[in-house]
Image: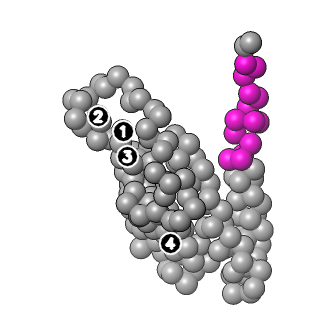
Amino acid sequence: MATKEKSFWKRHGLSITVASVILLLFGLYLGADPNAHWGAFFGNAIADWTGLLVTILATKYLREIGSAESKKVEPPAPLIPRPLHQFLHEHSLVIFLLITGVGWVIAFMRMSPNAKWGQVVGNIVSEWTQVLGIVVLTKGLVEVGSKESEK
């Protein structure tokens, strides 16, 4: 029996919804005072939800050796030397987080940390550090009750 292809919404609904929440928070933050409770909340929430979106999208398309998802996907035919291609494929998630993280750090370093958007970008740098940390830490550490701890 042929499987009906899932709709665009079924395939991307989570990332679209999270991106929509980020846009809503962004709009609310534009008019908010960052020194007031709601303004501080909106700014921090932008960073939190951006970290969630990068987690959803990066783990959907990128791989990291040692994760269950990486074992299921064969790398495409290499256009560059095989060892380099394999390294880039096996560590694409960490490479992506490092490159984009450096971009966020550069942006943050050029802003006042106390400025309205400086606080948001500082929180995004923190989110990227957390996501990178969890990717690296979960390569060798497990938690009782997780699928990986049962192996």
Q: Nearer the viewer, residue 76 or 120?
A: 76
Q: Is residue 66 above or below residue 101?
A: above
- Foreground mark, 3 or 2, reads 3
Q: Is residue 142 above or below residue 2?
A: below
Q: Position of residue 108 (x, y in %)?
A: 46, 71
Residue 65: numbered disc: 3
Which residue appears at 61% of the width and 67% of the height?
A: 47
Which residue appears at 35% of the width and 42% of the height?
A: 90
Residue type, mark 1 in image:
His
Q: Nearer the viewer, residue 33 or 6?
A: 6
- Per the rendered image, the range of residues in magenta is 3-16
- Foreground mark, 1 or 3, reads 3
- Foreground mark, 4 or 2, reads 2
SS at badge 1: helix
Residue 89: numbered disc: 1
Residue 126: numbered disc: 4
Inspect the magenta stretch and tell me whether residue 124 lies in it. Answer: no
* C-alpha span from label 1 to label 3: 8 Å
